[in-house]
Amino acid sequence: MAYKTVNPYTNELVKSYPDATSEEIETALGTGYKLYKQWRDESVASRAVILHEIADRLRENENELAKIATIDMGKLYAESKGEVELCAIIADYYADNGADLLKPTPISSRNTGDAEILHQATGVLMMVEPWNFPYYQIMRVFAPNFMVGNPMILKHASNTPGSAEAFAKIVQEAGAPAGSLTNLFASYDQVADIIADPRVQGVALTGSKRGGQSVAETAGKNLKKNSMELGGSDAFVVLSDADVDKAVDLAWRVRIYNAGQVCTSDKRFIVADNLYDEFLKKLKANFEKLVPGDPMDPKTTIAPMNSKRAKEKLQGQIDKAVAGGANVYYGNQPIDLPGQFIQPTILTDIDKDNPEFYDEMFGPVAQVFKVSSDQEAIDLANDSELGLGGIVVSADPQHGKAIAEKIETGMVFVNSFLVSLPELPFGGVKGSGYGREMSQLGLNAFTNEKLVVTAQDPDWNNPAGGLAVFK
């Protein structure tokens, strides 16, 4: 596949990158496996210093790294800087807490010995990551597994090779051993071969449903543990007791951040009927104020989409939805700029017969639905093939929490942005995938949960009453 940076604002080819060779892949596997065996004999805490150094270097190079990401995939420069800082926060968190979180877990048992679970490394991991957060997506997997002692091979998106290269360079310059993170401009066929290699013990993927199915099939066939984050069509539920101004102020920011190209960005706005008309009017007013332009310019408030292909796909979805009966409440007009812009758009009257009812619209499009009860809101929120995140807005936090508990998704935030922090688990259910990244759950995603029982006064007659493992 062709790895190249095409600036989404100017449409200019910035740089092309050569595909990975068989020799590079074998070197990555060999170096990673050698490092895994070395790390098995070293303490977890010994890696914390390097991870802190990675965080420091991210902050020191924040401006340049942000510029690389913006040129790669088009997000606002300020958003790119925020992403770099989040990566540093994640690195610092695992450096500070990884060793304690990976301590053995004692088990109370009737056995005469001491029982505990060790959380140990398993081997080299394959990372397949997307373009929309080109640094953060890497760091979510890298930081915890670096502390665990699992070396990693990265296959990043073909349109963000500059970001992948820059991240790997930061890791190297921070003093991480060779093999800690190896960036390869690999094809999907090469990824399949890497997964099949016995030195690789796990696969972490964030991407599309189709990509996830393909990689999960290869991982399953080779009995490799894997985690999948496959996008979302999250619900933003505005209950009848909500403050509509606060709800809208949260809603437009959620939908427009990163030009709407966020897996956990709410895409379906489910609004109580007593607030519906006012919500639409005020959401439109906020969309009208957005200024398209150069994402490096601080005056720009809506960035281009990441590529011509992404823009064409989203425009096709809008056209299909409208042809299927949806109403364009606002937007869907061309923007007279050279970049890959989509005017922020509000669609209403999307019923279950609409061909786009179940599709994820990955861009600045808000689908707004009217409901007449809490139960109708819950049912509509759950009527989705996906289940990643969600937001509930209510004047009564406990009322909002009660609704949030009934939504079938991996994460729900009440009266708040769906924030990403290293101590909070990230992941979904249903078609949004399985497994969790970040938090202690993410730290243990690719560990060997090894049981060790140490008998202090062994009795071979098995007095504890358990089942002997031999006959």
Image (cartoon, rainbow, N blue to C red):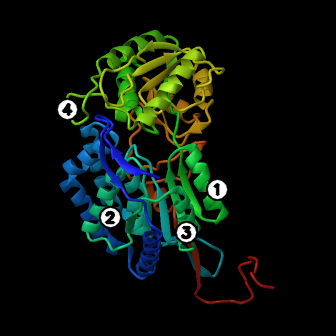
Assess whether mark 1 and mark 3 are in contact (beta carbons under 8 angstroms): no
Element class at badge 2 = helix
Q: Is residue 265 visible?
A: no
Residue at point 56%, 69% (across, down) = 449
How far is disc 1 from disc 2 in space, using C-alphas? 33 Å
Which residue does the numbered mark 2 point to in the structure image? Answer: 95
Q: Which of these two is toward me, 201 or 70?
A: 70
Q: Amino acid at mark 4?
A: Pro
Of the two numbered discs 2 and 4 in the rendering, the one whose residue sits closer to the viewer: 4
Q: Residue furthest right?
A: 471
Of the two numbered discs 1 and 2 in the rendering, the one whose residue sits closer to the viewer: 1
Which residue does the numbered mark 1 point to in the structure image? Answer: 217
Q: Position of residue 424 (x, y in %)?
A: 43, 49
Whichever of labels 4 and 3 marks the residue nearer the N terminus, that label is 3
Q: Is residue 255 visible?
A: yes
Q: Which mark is residue 58?
A: none
Q: Position of residue 129 (x, y in %)?
A: 45, 52
Q: Amino acid at mark 1?
A: Glu
Q: Amino acid at mark 3?
A: Gln
Whichever of labels 2 and 4 marks the residue nearer the N terminus, that label is 2
Categorize mark 2 by other alpha carbons within 10 Å: few (<14), some (14-19), many (20+): many
Say above or below: 250 vs 96. above
Q: Which mark is residue 201?
A: 3
Element class at badge 1 = helix
Residue at point 46%, 30% (across, down) = 312
Which residue does the numbered mark 4 point to in the structure image? Answer: 298
Whichever of labels 4 and 1 marks the residue nearer the N terminus, that label is 1
Whichever of labels 3 and 1 marks the residue nearer the N terminus, that label is 3
How far is disc 4 from disc 1 in space, using C-alphas? 44 Å
Assess whether mark 3 and mark 4 are in contact (beta carbons under 8 angstroms): no
